[in-house]
Image (cartoon, rainbow, N blue to C red):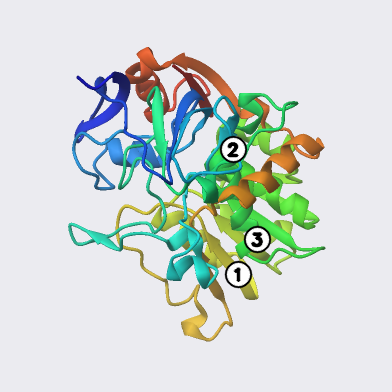
Amino acid sequence: MAAKMKAAIFVEKGRIVLDEKPIPDVGPQDALVRITTTTICGTDVHILKGEYPVEKRLTIGHEPVGIIEKLGSSVTGYHEGQRVIAGAITPSGHSYACLCGCGSQDGPGTRHGFKVAGGWKFGNTIDGCQAEYVLVKDAMANLSPIPDHLTDEEVLMCPDIMSTGFSGAERGNVRIGDTVVVFALGPIGLCAVAGAKLMGATRIIGVDTVPARMEAARKLGADHVVDFRAGDPVEQILALTDGRGVDVAIEALGTQSTFESSLKVLRPGGTLSSLGVYSSDLAIPLAAFGAGLGDYTIVSTLCPGGKERMRRLMEVCGSGRIDLKPLVTHRYKLDDIEAAYDLFANQRDGVLKIAITP
């Protein structure tokens, strides 16, 4: 009988529960990683709510930090017992998408008529890492060794929210001297603030209403924080920019209202960099889009993955230029994953990110 492990599985809309599953078998190019720390993502909550479709009995989670338990026969350059992370996005390295420079889209295409998010496989198209073990396919393209001086929690943001938030600034082509606004200061929005600062933005505006998140944004580089409950955020942002508008607007929530507001605050020729996961159709307002004549750019991003991306992000963590450790506000055991989901999905007690340890 196959050995079993504990795993958080999707049962049905509104239910992700802890159950037992077989420990995965290891193929030639795979690695079995024993999870030491993982976390819950906003996308997992979309799955929980039935807003993003996955197969029943799938293990959820896409942010693995752990130790190599077993290596496939073809995997070289690693050793069992080595501390590693893998990105939320796990490109093969040899697909058409990878070879044309878009490894994040190295995925299966569609499922149930829904366009599946590219190279996001953990907790989407294959079993994920809210479990005692996770199978990492294409291990040599995706496993990145953790430097000894970094703790699990110091690198926990790298697999997803740090890579995603930074990519919002990167895809938005933030330049030295730019004014950037970030709509929604959840974990990804906070990382977008940090990424914009690293890329040279000299005025960064955050938009939220939760005091703890607004303070966290200031610590990560926001020069101004707009409370959207205190008045129309578009008017507040235009006032802060003397009516000019912003060079780059980063949308980090995934709603029609924040998408529209991001478009409305752009200067002519500005860029809307979309990071949010949307759960319904979007409409582009005619006036805000300048009837299609405003030279605007709208870009979307799926978190870049692969071992080189992870190495670079861990270099940033080790450099001391930003400190993302305070984003971990709560800690739970895997045995208590259902309670962790309840806390995170309902955004209680000032939660930002939860460290889950088996």
Q: Mark 1 and mark 2 in contact (Cβ < 8 Å)?
A: no
Q: Mark 3 and mark 1 in contact (Cβ < 8 Å)?
A: no
Q: Looking at this view, is 195 or 243 the one in front? A: 195
- Helix, strand, or loop for circle 1? strand
Q: Does residue 68 appear in this view?
A: yes
Residue beneath label 1, please? 271
Q: Residue at x 43, y 46 (%)?
A: 29
Residue beneath label 2, please? 78
Alpha carbons under labels 2 and 1: distance apart: 41 Å
Alpha carbons under labels 1 and 3: distance apart: 11 Å
Residue type at the position of mark 1:
Thr
- Helix, strand, or loop for circle 3? helix
Q: Residue at x 54, y 28 (%)?
A: 80
Depth-wise, is mark 2 or mark 1 nearer the camera? 2
Q: Earlier in the sequence, mark 1 or mark 3?
A: 3
**In the displayed structure, would residue 171 be above or below residue 188?**
below
Where, quadrant-wise, is the N terminus in this rendering?
Answer: top left
Q: Earlier in the sequence, mark 2 or mark 3?
A: 2
Near mark 1 (Cα within 10 A), the count class, few <14, some 14-19 or many ≥20, is many
Depth-wise, is mark 1 or mark 3 nearer the camera? 3
Where, quadrant-wise, is the C terminus in this rendering?
Answer: top left
Near mark 3 (Cα within 10 A), the count class, few <14, some 14-19 or many ≥20, is some
Residue type at the position of mark 3:
Glu
Q: Position of residue 9 (x, y in %)?
A: 27, 29
Q: Position of residue 106 (x, y in %)?
A: 42, 61
Q: Does residue 208 appear in this view?
A: no
Depth-wise, is mark 2 or mark 3 nearer the camera? 2
Residue beneath label 3, please? 170
Alpha carbons under labels 2 and 3: distance apart: 30 Å
Q: Residue furthest bottom?
A: 293
Q: Looking at this view, is 112 or 43 the one in front? A: 112
